[in-house]
C-alpha cells in the first residue's frame, strides 16, 4: 500500500486529489495537506476586489468534500520537506510520511522585492488571495468616496498578467456604472514589453485588441516598466526601451493601486537542496518528476518554466488552468504506472487557454502550444466571453464541491470555444 501526499489544495491540488483517488482505488492512501481549511477559486478574485463577489461565493470548506471521497485532509502549513527520508514536517513537531509527494502549493508572493509594495507592509493592493482581494475591495470603497488617480498592473518578474488586465477593465466598468469614471484617471503599469504580451510573446492580435480596449476606456499605459519603489501616495517607475536602457523616470501619484507581485517558491519547498531553481520553483522533467527526487512530482504555478523570450524587463511565463490540469492528469497516470512497476510515460500538454473578463465584455486567448511557434494562435473578444467566465466559475466550483474528477477545462472551455481538434492541433 502506497501513501500519496498532495501538498496544496488549490486549482491544481483539489483536482489532483480527486483524480488520484479515482485512479488508485481504495488500496492506496491519499492525503491532502493545505495551509487553510478552505478552497478558494483564485480566478474570481478580480471580482471580489471590485465588490462583485463575496468570500462565500468563491470559497468552501475542503474537509467534507475530500473526506466523503476517502481522502484524508490536514489543514496545516508544511514547515519542512525532508526529501531524503520522505517526510513532511508540520508545526508542533508533527510529521507525515509519504511514498509519493505531489507539490501544488502555488507561489510565495514576493512583495518584499519592491520597497513599499503589497497590502501588508506596503501601499498597494493585491488580488492574489481571497484575503488580499477583500482588503482591495475595502480600499476601493474608499476610492469611491475620495476619487483620484488609479494605478493597476504587474511589477518586474510577474508571470500572471491576465488578472491585472481583468482588474483594470472591471474597475473601469464599475466606475462608469457609478458615473464617477471621469473623476478617476487610470494608468496601467506593466513589465511586459508591450500591451498584450501576457508573458507569452503575445497571442494572436492580443496587442492590437488590448491596446484598442485601453484607448476606448481612456486607460493610459507604461510598458517595459520597472517599479523602483512605492510610497504612501506615489509610485516611482523606470521606463525602458527595447535595449533595456532607461528612457524615462515616472513619479505617478495615486489614490488607489493594485499591482501584482513577482512569484517565488514557498519556503518549505524552496529550502530543499536540489529540488528547485534559484527562485524556489520546482524543477521537473517531461513527466513532471523532479530529477533528483523522482518520487516528488509537481504541477502548477510552483514549477520552473523558462520565459518564452528575453525581455528588457523580466517577465515570467504564466501557467493557465488548462495547463495545470494537464500536468495533474499526467502525474496521476505516471504514479499509477510506477505503482504497477512501469516507467512513467505521460507528459502534459503545455497549452495556454484563458478567459479574461473585462467587466461588460471579455476575451479568450488560445496558444497551442504555449511556446511559439504555434499550431493555434487565437485571441477573440466579445460579451460571450464575459458570460462564459461567469458560467465556468460556477461549473468549476460545483465540480470541486461535488468531488468530480475529470478534465474541467477541456470539457468546458474547449467545447465552448469550438476547439474539437486539440489532439490534431498539438501534432
Image: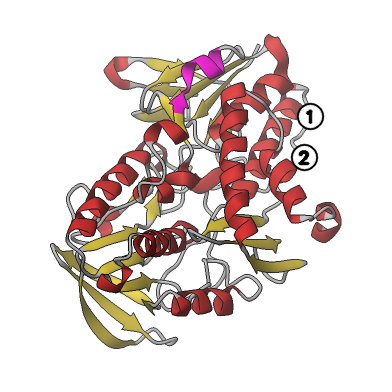
Q: Tell me the distance, in whole angstroms, between the alpha carbons under discs 1 and 2.
A: 9 Å
Tags 1 and 2 in contact by the CB under 8 Å rule? yes
| Position of residue 260 measured from the top left corner of the image (x, y, whole percent) | 36, 58
The location of residue 141, given as percent across then percent down, is 24, 51
Dot 1: what SS?
A: loop
- For marks 1 and 2, give the one nearer the viewer: 2
Which label number is shown at residue 342?
1
Left or right: 51 as drawn, with respect to 216 = left
Task: Tell me the residue at 78%/22% (across/down).
Answer: 340
Element type where label 2 sits in the image: loop
Q: Is residue 63 magenta?
A: yes
For residue 380, what is the image quadrant? Answer: bottom right
**Region of the chain picked out in magenta, as a range:** 60-67
Which residue is identified by label 2? 345
Q: Nearer the viewer, residue 148 or 159?
A: 148
**Quadrant assignment for the C terminus:** bottom right
Amino acid at each position: 500500500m502506497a501513501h500519496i501526499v498532495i501538498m496544496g489544495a488549490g486549482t491544481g491540488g483539489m483536482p489532483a486529489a480527486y483524480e488520484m483517488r479515482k485512479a488508485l482505488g481504495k488500496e492506496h492512501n491519499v492525503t491532502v495537506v493545505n495551509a487553510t481549511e478552505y478552497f478558494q477559486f483564485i480566478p474570481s478574485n478580480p471580482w471580489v476586489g471590485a465588490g462583485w463577489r463575496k468570500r462565500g461565493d468563491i470559497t468552501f470548506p475542503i474537509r467534507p468534500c475530500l473526506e466523503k471521497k476517502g481522502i484524508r485532509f490536514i489543514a496545516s502549513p508544511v514547515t519542512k520537506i525532508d526529501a531524503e527520508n520522505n517526510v513532511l514536517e508540520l508545526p508542533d513537531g508533527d510529521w507525515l510520511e509519504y511514498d509519493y509527494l505531489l507539490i501544488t502549493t502555488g507561489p510565495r508572493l514576493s512583495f518584499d522585492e519592491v520597497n513599499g509594495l503589497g497590502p501588508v507592509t506596503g501601499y498597494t493592493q493585491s488580488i492574489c488571495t481571497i484575503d488580499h482581494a477583500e482588503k482591495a475591495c475595502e480600499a476601493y470603497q474608499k476610492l469611491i468616496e475620495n476619487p483620484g488617480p488609479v494605478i493597476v498592473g504587474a511589477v518586474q518578474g510577474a508571470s500572471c498578467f491576465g488578472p491585472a488586465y481583468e482588474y483594470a477593465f472591471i474597475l473601469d466598468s464599475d466606475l462608469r456604472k457609478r458615473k464617477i469614471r471621469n473623476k478617476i484617471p487610470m494608468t496601467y503599469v506593466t513589465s511586459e514589453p508591450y500591451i498584450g504580451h501576457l508573458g507569452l510573446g503575445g497571442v494572436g492580435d492580443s496587442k492590437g485588441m488590448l491596446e484598442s480596449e485601453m484607448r476606448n476606456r481612456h486607460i493610459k499605459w507604461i510598458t517595459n516598466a520597472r517599479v523602483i519603489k512605492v510610497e504612501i501616495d506615489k509610485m516611482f517607475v523606470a521606463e525602458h526601451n527595447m535595449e533595456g536602457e532607461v528612457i524615462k523616470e515616472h513619479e505617478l501619484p495615486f489614490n488607489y493601486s493594485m499591482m501584482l507581485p513577482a512569484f517565488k517558491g514557498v519556503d518549505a519547498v524552496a529550502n530543499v537542496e536540489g529540488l528547485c531553481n534559484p527562485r524556489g520553483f520546482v524543477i521537473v522533467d517531461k513527466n513532471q518528476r523532479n530529477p533528483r527526487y523522482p518520487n516528488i512530482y509537481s504541477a502548477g504555478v510552483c514549477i520552473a518554466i523558462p520565459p518564452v523570450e528575453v525581455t528588457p524587463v523580466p517577465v515570467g511565463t504564466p501557467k493557465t488552468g488548462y495547463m495545470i490540469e494537464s500536468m495533474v492528469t499526467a502525474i496521476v497516470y505516471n504514479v499509477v504506472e510506477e505503482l504497477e512497476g512501469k516507467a512513467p510515460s505521460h507528459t502534459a500538454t503545455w497549452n495556454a487557454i484563458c478567459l479574461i473578463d473585462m467587466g461588460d465584455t471579455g476575451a479568450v486567448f488560445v496558444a497551442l502550444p504555449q511556446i511559439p511557434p504555434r499550431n493555434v494562435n487565437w485571441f477573440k473578444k466579445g460579451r460571450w466571453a464575459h458570460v462564459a467566465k461567469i458560467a465556468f466559475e460556477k461549473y468549476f466550483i460545483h465540480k470541486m464541491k461535488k468531488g468530480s474528477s475529470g478534465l474541467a477545462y477541456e470539457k468546458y472551455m474547449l467545447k465552448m470555444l469550438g476547439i474539437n481538434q486539440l489532439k490534431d492541433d498539438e501534432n
